[in-house]
Image: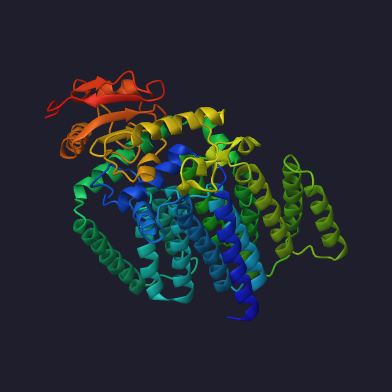
Amino acid sequence: MKTLEISLVSLVILISFGLNFYFGHQGLMPLDDLQNFNSGFRVLNGDFPFRDYYSITGPILDIWQGNIYKIFGVSWQSFLLQASIMNCLYSLTIFSFLKCLKFSSINCFYYSLSAGLLMYPTAGNPTVEHNSLILSVIATLIFFTALIQNKKKYIFVSILIFFIAFFTKQVPTSYFIIFCILIYIFRIFSNYDILTLFHTFIYTLIISIIFMIYFNLNNVSFENIYDQYITIATNLGENRLADLNFNFVYENISKLFFLLFLLIPSFYLSFITRKLDISIILISLSLIIIFYEIHSNNQPITFSLLPLYVSLFYYFYSKENLELKFVKYFLYLIIVYAFYRILRYETFYIFIFISLFLIIYFKKKGSINNLLLVYLFVTTCLYFEKYIKIRAWDDLSKNQLSKSFDAGLIDAKFKYLKWKTVYYEDAEDEKKLIFSTLNYLKNLDKNVNYILISDYQIYNAVLNKKDFSPVKYWFENATYPSKNHRLREKFEVFFKSKITKNNVSQIIIDNTAKFKSEELLEFRWLYNCLEKKNNFAQDEIIDVFLIKNNCIK
């Protein structure tokens, strides 16, 4: 590797890590972020997903986070470490793949820098959505490289990463696996090869056995995995699809306008060359993106695939040695429109626009490569301003971070985190909830075991108390089966065992989770054994229910 390339790769690592680490300290979403913070703590203390708590998300993130805590200790910084490393891996994979496609080192740097800015800084801290998307893209690009360079060992690595991605989150991993199959069927990067198919089958079988042995060693049955990770999770997906309407679909797709718009020049290139490769790839990627965004129902993160979109288009365009005026004028048009859109957020971009226009016009730099880089630059900046800078992933809006407070006030584990959530407009109300709950838990006898139902899953880590909750987070028909679901009885038996085996004597609810106090009625066997505690210092903030002795059988 040349000195320039080493320097560029080092810069990519530094910027990708640093950007994510910074934005990971800017606000949070309690439900999404703190469940993963807590699940890593549970693994650290001996729990295992599927076995000790119900989870419809994969165990990989929890296990990784537990191991990171074991090495670096439990803190917000060690929590962000996983996300920052994953962001670096994504950027470096883009860099390496483009080098495989014979891109210049400078161009690889620009594309990978955009990747590092757009991927994980949206959330900043570990999420199954980001991890599974990153791992799926990495596995896909390694698979492409295996086909291009005819390296069978890369196929093994690709399949292994796909398994890890799938056990991080089922979607979008499943979509990317189908995508790779289509790429092979259409012979885009290589011809059919029986030996390749044979290797793929054998590798898949070997890795499947390895994963089965791993789960078996941790006393996780296939039945538990299937019930939680397939049946309950599928039920959630079906419910989301049932609630679809045109406005919802349009809203999600329109957010990715500048990504999907590249389909137009791709179709034109396919029409002129009579080759469908680029259209098949971008159409397939677009379908993955659309299905994923609709299915996940989160703030968009797939615009992080923009560098991959743009680079793949240029790769197939440059192979034809064409100068298509339509493509050039199309890029001019969309660049101008993107600059127009970004001026809504910051007016200083007008000076960047004028400077780039003058350089392209007077220096005759209007090649397709340069125009695509300008397009990548402006759209990266647009998505950064629209989603990352204002912390849209946390559902925060512009300037809300100014109302944050130093989370180090809660505990030293959260030092440097700007605590601002969408749950409370007034930070004082939020602090009152957190400190009241903490004070109540601190004053409990050390021998008292409890189940805390809250989206603020920080208390057990702060107090170094074991978590006995039967679920990763409390959300009916998402993390545990609904009342009429065929698996409900099995879950209730598991819930009972968590209480009886661990001598749990209190159910504490702060009513921030979707599960409220009144929903205890759904578990009649539990409700009949509860007695609400009154006249304690925090009784206006939290609900505490005492479990009667020897009542639950």
The residue lying at 26 percent from left, 30 percent from top is: 506
Image quadrant occupied by the N terminus: bottom right
Image height of 392 relative to 379, above or below: above
Residues 82 and 198: in front is 82
| Residue 232: % across, % down | 29, 39
Image quadrant occupied by the C terminus: top left
User: Looking at the image, which residue sits at the far top?
Assistant: 535
Instruction: Mark yes or no: residue 190 visible.
Output: no
The residue lying at 43 percent from left, 55 percent from top is: 176
| Colour style of the rendered protein structure | rainbow
| Residue 258: % across, % down | 64, 47
Number of callouts: 0
Image height of 280 relative to 99, above or below: above
In the rendered structure, the answer to whether residue 343 lies left or right of residue 433 reads right
The residue lying at 35 percent from left, 54 percent from top is: 66
Image height of 150 relative to 244, above or below: below
Residue 307 picture quarter:
bottom right
| Residue 508: % across, % down | 32, 29
User: Looking at the image, which residue sits at the far right?
Assistant: 362
Residue 3 picture quarter:
bottom right
Image height of 388 relative to 246, above or below: below
| Residue 530: % across, % down | 22, 22
In the rendered structure, the answer to whether residue 357 lies left or right of residue 445 reads right
Instruction: Mark yes or no: residue 458 visible.
Output: yes
Residues 401 and 228: in front is 401
Residues 271 and 458: in front is 458
The residue lying at 22 percent from left, 46 percent from top is: 224
